[in-house]
Image (cartoon, coloured by chain):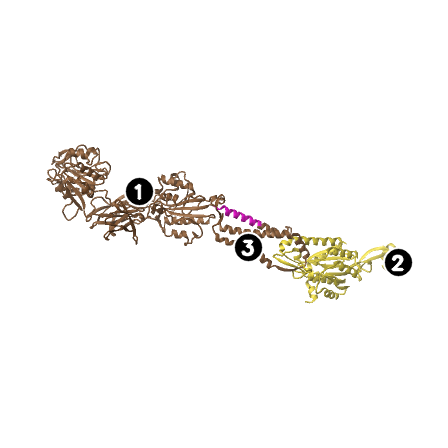
Chain colours: A brown, B yellow
Amino acid sequence: MLSFLNTPLLWGLAAVSVPVIIHLINLMRHRRVRWAAMEFLLAGQRKHSTWIRLKEMLLLLLRMAAVAAVVLIVARPRLDGGLGKRLGDVNTHHVVLLDDSFSMSDRFAERNVFDQAKAAVERIAQAALDESSAQTFTLLRTSQAAASQGAAKPDLLEETVNAEFVFRDRPDRKLNRVLEPIGPSESAAGPEAALRSLSTLLKSGDGEERILYIVSDFRARDWRGTPELRSLLAAQEKRSAQIIFVNCVETDRPNLAVTSLAPKSGTVTAGVHFEVQVEARNFGLATAERTAVDIRSDGDSGGTIFLDPIPPGKSVVGKFFAFFSDPGEHKLSVELPSDPIATDNRRYCVVDLPAKMPVLVIDGNPTSTEAADVAWALAPAGPVASGIAPQVQPPSFLIDDENHRLADYWAVYLANVKELDDAAVRNLEAYANAGGGVCFVVGNQTSVPFFNDKLHRDGAGLFPVALDSEKQLFRDREAKAFDIVGSSHPVFARFADERNSFLRDVAIDRYFGVRELPPALAADTPADAEPAVTIAATLRNGAPLAVERQFGKGRVMVLLTVPSAPWSDWKKNPSFVITMLETQSHIARRDRQFDDARLVGSPITFVLDAKIYQANINILPPRGSETVPVPGVVVPDGLKFDYPDAAQAGFYQAELIRLDKTAELRQAAVNVDAGEGDLARVGESELRERLDGLRFQFRAADRVQPAESESSSSMLSSLILYGLIVLLLGEQALAYACSYHAPRKGAAV
Amino acid sequence: MSASKRFLHPEAIQRISRLDLRARHIVEGFLSGEHRSPYFGQSIEFVQHREYTAGDDLRRVDWKVWAKQDKYYVKQYEEETNLRATLVVDVSAGMQYGSGPLNKYEYASTVAVSLAYLLLRQQDAVGCVAFDEKVRRTVPIRSRINHLQSIITALDASAPRDKTDIAKVLLDVAQETPRRGLITIISDLFVDRPALLRGLRLLKQRGHDVMVFHIMDDDELDFNFTGATRFEGLEGPDSLNCNPRALREGYLEAMNAFLEEVRRGCSQNGCDYALIRTSQPLDAALAAYLSSRLGMHHRN
């Protein structure tokens, strides 16, 4: 079945009549000549008239056929079906995967990489337009493929390439209208999702020749060590005539990214200055000196800090203190100075501050003061609030987890506890395992067999060490050493850089010995090295004073002395308060992170109590002016709200409506995947090595034309073209034969 | 334009006036003139001595020879006579065709008048016959210089008609010209060829020196027409619509065959033949022809 790409041009076939019209006009315009030698004229005509007439008719037909052939070539014919395929006249399908991850926003001078990529896409379409066979075009952005979870929404799907689709520099064509509003996304999506979605998105592709273009910046992060990518590309290779990688980046550029922003775990409550850590990574090749970090808290400027020099490829953590007087959710964000990629210079964090941080203090001996001492040290009276609300309870409190919900407490202190119920031990271990912090202060009540058998269990239990017995630290008045020897452990690190530490004045008389010291554990071993037992502080004689271990996600700390007489005079020393507050910071629940790890493209989920809230919430995206209603879905826990398309980094504000029609606002921070800021690229040779055996072309963005392949050009048009050449040659020959030409040696007479 | 101005071109006349038109054969003149006569007579051109025989004019005896040899010899001189020329000019409708400044008729008349002037100037006698389908005008042979005007008037014909029977015309001419002389036919010869050749043969048999000036237009010889053209016959009702470029080959074939036939016919009958294009300058054409004829004459 013959069809034409430019059907309207077939009206041009009317031009076939032009030679006939010219002939008729010539007949009408003939000259009249009064002629004497009619005799010879008639003789000549009689002799040749039939042959002349035949030749003239043939010449006319040839000219008409030549005009028709030109019109047909311009109208771009194609043969559908088997014959067309045999002639190689198949549809060429240009499938363009456009990488719009935010690394494509790499900017130099006035253009960014994404502009280059868009120009490359236009060039691809333009080259397709210049082809004589039928061409279709599909454009899919990687962020669209990744966000839509398999149901990728291409910007263009199997569009026919014609002059309406793209035409030179005309900006009003369809492709330009589609490309114009597109910018680099804040997604970090690599090509995998887009490649995966191609199989569902595109038809079987029989009878078409597919050329797959991947227009990208080919960052090492996406293309290194990706067996899945290799297999996806191999699958495409089977169905595509060509795979063309279009590289839009020529040079490596330096880039700094904020990789993390979170309050340091510890006492993070309203009314307390809490420490916030910001981590920046240098993806460049030179050390970044004195990087300024602008801080904003709740939308207002929170000052600027300067980071230590960041070596290439390394991260540096900076610290600052934040303070919010009101409990509730607060917004914290930081921003680095402008660099080639601006998207990863910002990091957002929402901190949900409680008014107080409840901690549980288990009083093992109501007749002594240990529990009271601990509780006092955690919340000392005075003008500066610690933000901690200690609650003193007997050991039996731990048994009933159902009602007392240990998980609500940020830490559990066990002061001079003798023994615990088995259920209490289970609950306590579950609590620590889930991330809760436990601190033991041993004392005269402490039952060594119970601790060793039930709590330590040769290292399997909660308690870090096996206890020996109560020991005496003999006073040595001559000795110059101080009773407590601190270390770089976070709890005691604060004393290390003080010239006249209060810690030096503490006198320890008694302590619990440790049956066996953990083997060769240095104090500066990383605290979270599992199953490390760390000695945080020792005594003058080398015996451990404070040990710590990781238990599950939680931390367990043990003080091997009692802060009050007759064990020591520690509680009279201010260093006890500091030690306890630092301990609290160190062991406080770590599962309640202020999560900044929600990434662009992942959904924002709220699970709410259906008894309190209505089944609809509104979400206001960052930089958005209109809220997006999100309906809830009933799940066992209540109502679940999924905001699926967090396409931008920033603060999302959810408006929850209670059943009593009052509103409540909640914030959620969404950040970019900072790893995308790694601008290291893979070159062609490395790609060939990694995608071993895959046939592909690697082109710069300004040279994207596909390789000429015999089958991609239209055989039918070529056939007509050759036919036209033959026709024109025949026409010339016949025209020569139809007119008289004098012999070379001059005219007849 | 008066007839004399029409056919007498002073420049042409001036250029050819230095030439002579000589009879190729011996012609019988009626005056003493430039042409050789079959008779010996009073002349300055010595030919030979001959022994005296009875009856010879004693005035011709060469006494100087008698004095030396004691024999009577008679001196013989070549008698010279004048030429009687008849110009046979075609004034039919077909001669009206012309692509240049002169059509064939005008060119032929000019040739005739120029020749007449030349002959009259050298004391020869000239007559003229203008013909188309038959002899239309006849001017008797005279040698007076003012006879030229009669010739010019005769040639200025009106209402030309077709040529039909050239043999009859030439027979008429032969009968009108009993004495041997020079007969010059000036025509495009678009006539029946056998009749033409018959006529030429007749003239030759009567002892005339026959010259044929074949006047043709460039278009007729080259047929350089382009574009659709309708040819309408000057001498008949025929007409033809055609593409001349396509027809050219056939036409030229027929034309060349015609020219060849005429040339061969003239040569077989001992007639001088000259094909003259109307685009050729008249004087040059005549001069070339007369010079070559002079050359031939001297060879005789």
The vertical placement of B59 against A129, above or below, is below
Three-letter residue code for mark 3: Ser
Residue extending furthest toward the right = B54
Q: Which segment is the magenta one?
A: A713-730
Q: Is any atom of residue A582 visible in this view?
A: no
The vertical placement of A139 against B128, above or below, is above
Rendering coords of residue A284 (x, y %)? 32, 44
Rendering coords of residue A471 (x, y %)? 13, 34
For the residue carrying disc 3, how many other residues have a C-alpha within 10 Å: few (<14), some (14-19), or many (20+)? some
Q: CA distance from mark 3 to mark 2?
A: 98 Å
Q: CA distance from mark 1 to mark 2?
A: 154 Å
Residue extending furthest toward the bottom = B2
Q: Which residue is mark 2?
A: B55
Q: Which of labels 3 and 2 is toward the front?
A: 3
Rendering coords of residue A698 (x, y %)? 41, 43
- What number is the disc on residue A313? 1
On whether disc 1 and disc 3 are found on a single subunit, the reply is yes
Give the quarter of the image for residue A209: top left
Q: Earlier in the sequence, mark 1 or mark 3?
A: 3
Q: Which residue is mark 3?
A: A17
Secondary structure, mark 1, is loop
Secondary structure, mark 3, is helix
Q: Which of labels 1 and 2 is toward the front?
A: 1
The reply to whether callout 1 and callout 2 are in contact (CB within 8 Å) is no
Q: Which of labels 1 and 3 is toward the front?
A: 3
Q: Quadrant of the C terminus of chain B?
A: bottom right
Q: Chain of mark 1?
A: A
**Main SS, magenta residues:** helix
Q: Nearer the viewer, residue A563 or B207?
A: A563
Residue B78 lies left or right of residue A61; in this view the side is: right
Three-letter residue code for mark 1: Gly
